[in-house]
Structures are given as structure tokens and as C-alpha cells.
Image: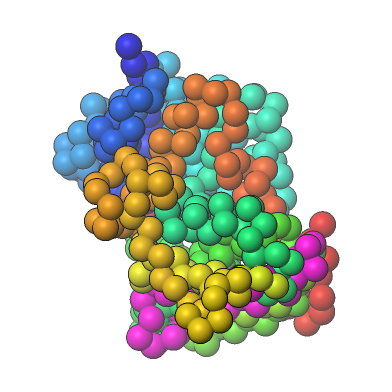
Amino acid sequence: MTKPLNLGMIGYGFMGRAHTNGYKRVGDFFPELEYRPVLKAACARNQENIQAFADQWGYESIETDWRALIARDDIDAVDICVPNNLHKEIAIACAEAGKMILCEKPIAMNTAEGEEMCQAVEKAGVANTVWYNYRRVPAVTLAKQIIDSGKLGKIFHYRANFLQDWTIADDLPQGGAALWRLDVDAAGSGVTGDLLAHCIDTAIWLNGSVSDVTAMTETFIKERVHQETGKKQKVGIDDACAFLCHFENGSLGLFESTRYARGHKALYTLEINGENASLRWDLHDLHRLEMFDHADEGITRGWKSIHVTDGEHPYMDKWWVPGLQIGYEHSFVHHVADFLKSLESGEPCHPTFRDALETQKVCDAVLASASDRSWHTIG
Ligand SMILES: NC(=O)c1ccc[n+]([C@@H]2O[C@H](COP(=O)([O-])OP(=O)(O)OC[C@H]3O[C@@H](n4cnc5c(N)ncnc54)[C@H](O)[C@@H]3O)[C@@H](O)[C@H]2O)c1
């Protein structure tokens, strides 16, 4: 007998769709799970739009006020898929109402907000997780297994990039639907919270905590018309960011993100170099993990590309046959599956709010360092 997990979804944009797809597919591909998501209600301010979303994706009902959604007795868990400036208020209200919370990243606008959210979920004792989904791309999960096995030996370097090119036009407005990411009041920061937060979460997961950072940021377009006021307003986000860091294990980190790398759409790459072996991964080729193992025989030693599609690879026994790959959307199916499993086991589903706060602290230190041009220790 399966148990229902009644879900309330807030937001119907990019992530509202990606997560809903995860809820819909998880039961078919992870049939052993005790809990089954039920799409109880979807919420957004525009009634017509949210009704259309609910009809298309199969939600039973709609709400136009997130407070009304949280007040409902038939909702067990709330999924927060709205701009970053709304995460804190919604998450704290959910915790106070005893709802489980699946919150989008970055956890909050800043560390102070994130700390309040952590305290609220910990006080209420509600299950919580933050959607740093790249951890659950099988090739990245495999990298974690290889690193944890000790095969790389002492780690010297970790480097990651997240490159895009969609904000180069200077007549692109800021704020409002679709373009809230350019409005500092809705997003909190630019590429640091939006893109580097992913790189930082994966880095901490794979390589341990960051101890200090030094950073530079740039805002290439200084003013943009705001969609809500129709007026030209100062741009408060970082368009590009690069930072150096030390990890607590003694390794050095190098990170770069921009929305001005012409030709790159979502190039998230990471590489880790240890004394015995190195690994690298590229989101554009997400089902492959590249590895160089110095222990290989000399004349055939070189980078090899592991096609992460075998049944023994993480999550892959749930999908097709060896050699057939899966994609981006499956990382969300895996996250839902792990969340449901965590409800069975009573163990946390990582990254929890507390884990995501560590990433937020690094983001804040990066922005502070770029502002005062000095090294910042992670508090
Ligand atoms: N994990 C990832 O890879 C990933 C990718 C993209 C976005 N995100 C995060 O997901 C969140 C949402 O981003 P998105 O790309 O889906 O944005 P989006 O602009 O596509 O969707 C935002 C949604 O929020 C709704 N919304 C706004 N204000 C609301 C309110 N007051 N009440 C109810 N609904 C409201 C909008 O109607 C819209 O449906 C952000 O925190 C973002 O950082 C994460």
C-alpha cells in the first residue's frame, strides 16, 4: 500500500514545470517507494494562468494566494518555485504551519534570511530540502562516489565555470516576469546566487567546506528599463563574477560565472585534480564523466570518458538499458525520489536548508569580497 504525499506547488515557471515532471514520473520509475506525490494544488497570482497550468499538468485545484495554500489541511508539502525574494516568507509560514518544504535555490536573498529559515524548519521539525539538482545528475553522483573512495588521493585543485550569454543586449529590461533575475530586489544577486550557487553547492559536496574567498564582480550594463515602472533604473546585480578560494582540505578553488560569454548557453563545467587522478564534467555532455587515472598503464594512460549509463552507475538501474542515456529533467526525478525515501527512513534529504545555508554564506562572502577587494573568511 502506498501513502499519498499531498503537494502544493507555488509558481508555474521553469522550475514549477521541472519539479512537476519529477513528481509525475517518480512513481513509475521508483515503484518501491512508500510515498506517492499527489498534485493537490498549484498556486500563482494570476488565476487564468495558474488554472491553465493546473489543467495541463494535472493539479486537482488552484490557489491565487500562497497563504491560502499553506492554510489548507489537505497539503502535506509545499514546493517553493518563485523568485528568491519570496523564499523566506513562504518557507517560514510553511514551517509554522507544519508543512514539509522543498525550496528552490538559492535558499534566500542572503545569509541572515537563510539563518531565519533554518531556525524555523529546525524548530518545527519539518522535512526540508533545497533543489541543488546537479548533485543528482548520475555522472556527478558518480564523481562523488569516486572521490569518497579516496581514489583521487590528496586534492590540489577544484575549478568550476557556469557560463551563459543571454543578457548581453543593453535594451533587455530588468524586473517582472521572466526578467526578475536582473532585478536585485527580486534576485538578491546576479550570477553569484543564480549560477555560482550551483557550482558552490556541488563543490562543497564533492570537496568539503570553503574556508575563505577573494572575488571580483562586474556589472557591464549599468542601467536598464524596469518592466514594472517603465523607467531606466540602476542595475544592482553582478553580471559576471570570478573568485578564488581555499578549501578546508587545503586545496585551491577557482570559479567563474557570467551571462556575457557569447556562445555559451548553460556551460557548467567542473574539474577536480588529486595526486592520483582527476575528474571533469560538463553539463552539455551531462551523461559523461571524464577521468584521468595516473595508475593506468603508461602507454595507454590518458583521459577516459565514462558513459554513465550502466545499471551499476548511480540511479541508472531505474531507467533504460546500458548505453542509453538520460537528461537534465531526470535530476529532478531523482531529487523527488530521494526526498520520498528520506520520509521513509527519517534521515534528512540533502541538501537541507542548513546545507544550503553554507552555500549562501560563500555567496555572501564572494559579494562582500568583490565590494571591498579583500579576502573574506566564511563565518
Ligand atoms: N535548480 C535549478 O537549476 C534552478 C533553475 C532555475 C531556477 N531556479 C530557482 O527557482 C526559482 C524560480 O525560478 P524560475 O526559473 O522557475 O522562475 P520563473 O520566472 O520561470 O517562475 C517564477 C514563478 O513564480 C510565480 N510567482 C511570482 N510571484 C509570486 C507570488 N507572489 N505568489 C505566487 N507565485 C508567484 C510566477 O507566477 C512564476 O510562475 C528561483 O528561486 C530560481 O533561482 C532553480
**Relative to the observer, which residue lies in front, 72 or 193?**
193
**Relative to the observer, which residue lies in front, 171 or 118?**
118
Q: Is residue 4 visible?
A: yes
Q: Residue at x 51, y 70 (%)?
A: 291
Name of the residue lying farthest toward the top: 1
Q: Position of residue 136 (x, y in %)?
A: 45, 50
In the figure, residue 75 lies in which quadrant?
A: top left
Q: Position of residue 231 (x, y in %)?
A: 43, 76
The correct choice, above or below, for 242 with respect to 97 in the image is below
**272 in the magenta segment:** yes
Q: Residue at x 20, y 34 (%)?
A: 58
User: What is the span of residues highlighted in magenta in the rendered image?
Assistant: 247-274
Q: Is residue 136 left or right of residue 154?
A: left
Q: Position of residue 119 (x, y in %)?
A: 71, 35
The correct choice, above or below, for 131 with respect to 68 in the image is below
* Image quadrant containing the N terminus: top left
* Image quadrant containing the C terminus: bottom right
Q: Tell me the colour scheme of the image.
A: rainbow
**285 in the magenta segment:** no
Q: Position of residue 211 (x, y in %)?
A: 79, 64
The correct choice, above or below, for 310 with respect to 260 in the image is above
Q: Residue at x 55, y 72 (%)?
A: 296
In the figure, residue 54 lies in which quadrant?
A: top left
The correct choice, above or below, for 295 with respect to 198 in the image is below
Q: Residue at x 25, y 28 (%)?
A: 61
In the figure, residue 89 lies in which quadrant?
A: top right
